[in-house]
Amino acid sequence: MVKVRGVSKSFGPKRVLHDVSLDIEKGKVTTLIGPNGAGKSTLLSLMSRLLPKDSGQILIDGREIGQYKSEELARRLAILKQTHHLNIRLTVRELVEFGRFPYSHGRLTREDREVVDEALRYLDLHEIEGKYLDQLSGGQRQRAFIAMVLAQDTEYVLLDEPLNNLDMKHAVQIMRITRSLANDLGKTVVLVLHDVNFASAYSDHIVALKDGRVAAAGTPDELIRSDVLGDIYEMKIPIETVGGCRVCIYFTGEQAAAL
């Protein structure tokens, strides 16, 4: 389990996170939602130690994150940031092999290659493993980066806005893969999403941030409600139930006219 306790973060005079506390349950999909500037991506960076926190504690399996050696943490937790530009030209396989670096340090063993093969199969990338990343569609490229994270073989997987710039088909594909990481492989997944309907359909737990604070937290049934989301996003959001899933209808009628 990941426990965040009283965490704050500032960039210069601007306070981005204020005394944030939350729990990330093992083997579940937890989604962070909220308006732009709410602190979602910053929180994910603090949880992965990409950024130092100003105060508070972040505990991974009962141990403060600062006590982990870098290699030890890399074997426990993997993160995919929303911007992952590379200055070198890589094939899909070469990218996925990078996920083994905490174990191989660049010298792949047979076991490392087997893990890479399995990640490529799981993300349905075997047929294009020899292609360069700049030859891929957006959905294929995103699957390749998720395969790299999967090859890192960590219990905790953090994905920062993994649906950026994807069309509906590829966004659904990525969310189904994310869900299967928890269901089939027992991974603990933390996502930052802007689309609350994807959060509703694929999450076990949702944490809503607003102005750097936890505004609400709970199951999709508890969070995907007009009163809760209305306070967070400051707009009227009707909710309908479709196929047992709560869906936000925020793009028609009065709501669209108000924009």
Image (cartoon, rainbow, N blue to C red):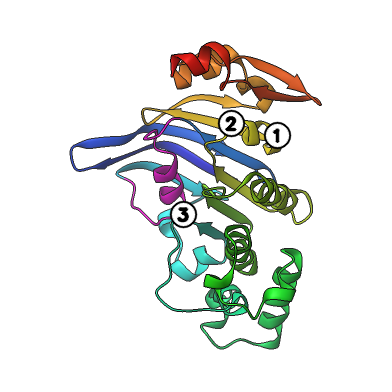
Mark 3 vs 2, N-terminal side: 3
The answer to whether 95 appears left or right of 52 in the picture is: right
The answer to whether 6 appears left or right of 185 in the picture is: left
Quarter of image, res 250: top right
- Tell me which amino acid carries mark 2: Val
Give the residue pinned by disc 2.
Answer: 196
Identify which residue is drawn at 47% across, 79% down: 89
- Tell me which amino acid carries mark 3: Ser
Q: Position of residue 33 (x, y in %)?
A: 52, 33
Q: Residues within 10 Å of mark 3 (few under 14, many from 20)?
A: many
Give the residue pinned by disc 1.
Answer: 201
Q: Residues within 10 Å of mark 1 (few under 14, many from 20)?
A: some
Q: Is residue 250 above or below residue 72?
A: above
Mark 2 vs 1, N-terminal side: 2
Identify which residue is drawn at 62% across, 35% down: 199
Label 2: element kind:
helix
Magenta residues span: 35-53
C-alpha gap between disc 2 and disc 1: 9 Å
Label 1: element kind:
helix
Please name which of the two marks, 1 or 3, marks the residue nearer to the observer. Answer: 1
Mark 1 vs 3, N-terminal side: 3
The answer to whether 95 appears left or right of 65 in the picture is: right
Q: Position of residue 51 (x, y in %)?
A: 35, 53
| Residue situated in front as seen by the camera: 230 or 219 | 230
| Residue situated in front as seen by the camera: 213 or 85 | 85
Task: Specify the farthest residue to the left.
Answer: 13
Give the residue pinned by disc 3.
Answer: 48
Q: Position of residue 61 (x, y in %)?
A: 58, 50
